[in-house]
Image: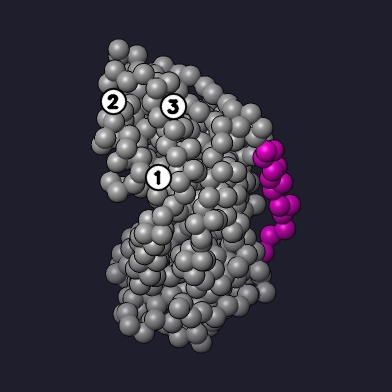
Amino acid sequence: MINYSKFKLQNGLTVIHHLDESTKLCVLNVLYNVGSKHENPEKTGFAHLFEHLMFGGSANVTDFDGELQKAGGESNAFTSNDLTNYYLTLPANNIETGFWLESDRMLGLNLDQEKLDIQRSVVIEEYKERYLNQPYGDIWLKVLPLAYKVHPYSWPTIGKELSHIEGATIEDVKEFFGRFYCPNNAILAVSGNISFDDCKRLCEKWFADIPQRQFNPVTILKEPKQLAPRQETVYADVPLDAIVKAYHIPARTDGAFYSLDFISDLLGAGKSSRFFNELVKKQNLFSELDVYISGDVEEGLLVIEGRLTKCVNMLDAEKSILNELERFKLEGVSADELQKVKNKTETNIRFNNMTALSKAMKLSYCELLGNIELANTEAEDYLAVSAEDIALSATTLLIENNCSTLYYYSKQK
């Protein structure tokens, strides 16, 4: 059980407090409700770009990392389709330094052309290294627009195309910051060895004077139901053929999410999974084969991704996947299989709730989802999944009319 208190400042900043006296540390986790899905389709990659810009100096702090390190702290951040999350850890007796640093960059970034040029170059090199110059790196640049036709999940967080980041201007980034980086678009979670009274006092001292901003929420179009199979074939300079099959699944807050998470584990997570034992180990059709869910806030994807063994025919490999899916639907999941995946999931949840940082992140994320109590009920929600729930999700969603398939052929044959 994660005990917490919650309050909101006059400027709209939501604050969550969790006391953990077993640690000598304290965590500040600032979640901004801006991810790649909030971007202009003609100017993508900005949410991720800001993950870099936010460490480049703010209104009254020229060196964020330097000031944090002087106080014995460390920090990091990540961007997703749905959010951008910044977190720092400090000794509890130095936590006011964290409040100062986070409030100052929420108040205003020190944005100038030189800083933009530096961070834009970093992101451009990251784009080239991870997506353009790495074998199989462009798979998601192909799969996402195949699976999504109107929803902004159709591009990765780093951006739809390199030219969007290359063309980012100082006016563009200032407008993006002004629109999304404000207290009424943020959730601050404070976790660790700090009392509620001290937390509230420091929040009032450092964040209360930051003005809220009025902005029109981004309209996110709902993806229409897919009614027919979609395929795309590409050829690339890679050593082995690969296949990706992406099935639409319900949103994170939908009850079916938990059964689909279990399905992904049962089919393709690790060496005890069905796909590994049958298609990798026994039939030797794939050198590797994984199944996972995207875990997005809105309707996401269950993905089957595999690299074929040399000389295996692509259509034969795909047929083997479909056969295993049909066998799974026909046979269902055994009581032992279901209990095993439940035990694993519960253990992971309990273990991940041990640190002040993980608890701050979870509380922030569940608040974003609209139900902070999910932080405490998640394990029970998973444990409540039945074999019938799994069968229903598999038979209704893991069908070809709901699937987008990328055939990724090697040119090296």
Residue in view at x 53 percent, y 74 percent: 16
* Label 1 Cα crowd, 10 Å radius (few <14 / some 14-19 / many 20+): many
Horizontal and vertical percent position of residue 209: 61, 72
Residue 308 lies in what quarter of the image?
top left
Label 1 belongs to which residue?
267
Identify residue type, mark 1. Leu
Query: Are discs 1 and 3 less than 8 Å apart at CB?
Result: no
**SS category of the residue bearing label 1:** helix
**SS category of the residue bearing label 2:** loop
Label 2 belongs to which residue?
309
Q: Is residue 354 magenta?
A: no
Q: What segment carries the magenta color?
A: 212-225
Q: In this rendered view, identify the residue nearer to me: 191 or 237.
A: 237
- Point out the tag, 2 or 1, that comes first from the N-terminus: 1
Residue 316 lies in what quarter of the image?
top left
Query: Are discs 2 and 1 less than 8 Å apart at CB?
Result: no
Query: Are discs 2 and 3 less than 8 Å apart at CB?
Result: no
